[in-house]
Image: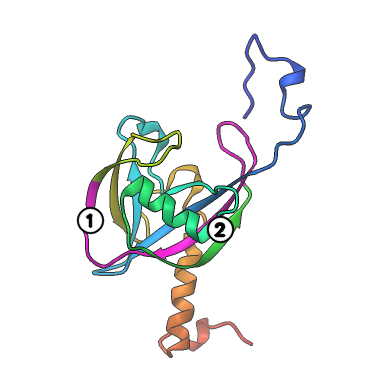
Amino acid sequence: MASSSPSSSPSSSPVSSPSLPPRVRVAAYVIRRHPSPALLVFDQPAFPEAGTQVPAGGVAPGEDPERAVLREVAEETGLTGARVVRRIAVDGRPHPETGQPRLTTYLLLEAPPEGPEEWEHRVDGDGGDAGMRFVCRFVPLPLAHPLADAQDAHLRRVDQGRAAQREAAGRGRPDEARPLS
């Protein structure tokens, strides 16, 4: 939604500005499977309006998404030892506040089975969030509340992947619920 201010002018509108290239990003669905499936999320106590989020951030030039997502998870949460399972989706939604084009690759990661359920972390790295305090935690799936910036939009694909694995193992849906092929 565009807002107008006394300093707004037609030349500064997104319509008349040259197109910006999308900011290439990654977002992490870090799942801990034991004792039951849970998703790694964090909140920023200094900025509660930012909402609950998953680790996400920019991809450096020449960096592949798998390396970038592991770096972002470590920088934003301190969690190391996660394993990339697969890419889930690529999302082209613009930034909700600035309208800047973004291209975000969502990746599924498996968290190590050991470790705390909740902890605080000061963000590492040299990005704009360096030094910020995040409260990290694993929340049960399915989520009770939506994530900020619709970051939960592709979580259903995580569940579908698990359903496909169960079905391949002969423990899938009842016959009447399976698609005909």
Left/right of residue 45 with respect to residue 22 in the rendered view: left
The residue lying furthest to the top in this view is 6
Look at 43% across and 37% down and name the residue there: 126
Segment colored magenta = 93-119
Which residue was labeled with disc 2?
A: 64
In the rendered image, the vertical position of residue 3 relative to residue 18, given as above or below: above
Quarter the N terminus occupies? top right
In the image, residue 143 sits, relative to residue 47, either above or below, namely below
Quarter residue 48 falls in = top left
Queried whether the magenta region covers residue 174, the answer comes back as: no
Rounded to the nearest whole Å, what is the CA distance between mark 2 and mark 1?
Answer: 29 Å
Q: What residue is at 31 percent from the left and 69 percent from the top?
A: 33
Q: Is mark 2 on a helix, strand or loop?
A: loop
Q: Which amino acid does label 1 sit on?
A: Glu
Instruction: Residue 130: give x, y in percent of width and height.
Output: 38, 35
Q: In the image as oriented, which residue stretches furthest toward the front?
A: 62
- Say which label, 2 or 1, has the lower sequence index: 2
**Quarter of image, res 125:** top left
* Image quadrant in which you'd find residue 8: top right
Q: Report helix, strand or loop for mark 1.
A: loop
Count of marks overlaid on the render: 2
Whether residue 23 sits left or right of residue 113 in the image: it is: right
Res 117 label: 1
